[in-house]
Amino acid sequence: MRPITKKDSLGPRDYAVIQAGGNGTRLWPISRKSKPKQFQLLLGNQSLLQRMHGLLLRSFEHDRIFIQVPPQFVPLVREQFPELPAEQVIIEPESRDTGPAFAYSAAVLYGRDPEARIGFFYSDHLIQSEHVFKQTLTTGFKALSSYPDHLVMLGVRPLYAHTGLGYIERGEKKHVPGLKNGVYNAQAFIEKPDIGRA
């Protein structure tokens, strides 16, 4: 396996937005309202947010990575990313869950670059293989090049049935030139099904 290098980065119109506004209530008492799990040092000497930012630096240029948070978490971002320019922190006017958060950051970035292609990433995901993650990002952005009027979702196979997950039902396979990996239409999205359906 060849090493991942900076020259493998995505294009100048490709952006990453790290969603870091969650309250982390499921990890209480470690995760608190004043410092939720994405800002905690749970795995070594970096927070989950810092780990995700570092991982995305393998694919995106530094000035194309944005962190989105509500106002109360801006001091935590400043503390953990003292060199991050203020314009790379997207401050939500108020917390309105995931869909509106995506729409808000997309509106901010499209206002700056009408040809932006945006990937949204959660701050609290544990990525076990940097190489596979990078390959998957490349696959997603290639799929977007072939189908620019589509949204592209990246998913993983669950290890067991879980009622707290969102499930993607795969539809027909789509052709993307130069890709060996499968890309499929999403037939349905089932959010947090009961255990029988999961």
Image (cartoon, grey):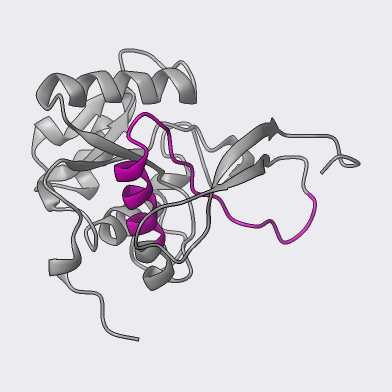
Magenta segment boundaries in residue numbering: 136-161
Q: Position of residue 131 (x, y in %)?
A: 37, 72
Q: Position of residue 105 (x, y in %)?
A: 29, 25
At a point 23% along the width and 49% down the height, the residue shown is 80
The image quarter containing residue 50 is bottom left
Left or right of 35 on screen, residue 23: right
At a point 50% along the width and 32% down the height, the residue shown is 23
Q: Looking at the figure, which quarter contains the C terminus?
A: top right
154 or 17: nearer the viewer: 154
The image quarter containing residue 115 is top left
Looking at the image, is 37 positioned above or below residue 59? above
Left or right of 175 on screen, residue 116: left
141 or 20: nearer the viewer: 141
Looking at the image, is 176 positioned above or below residue 170? below
Q: Position of residue 9 (x, y in %)?
A: 18, 60
7 or 20: nearer the viewer: 7
Looking at the image, is 46 positioned above or below residue 62? below
Asked if one can make out residue 20 in the rendered structure from this viewpoint, the answer is yes
Asked if one can make out residue 47 in the rendered structure from this viewpoint, the answer is no
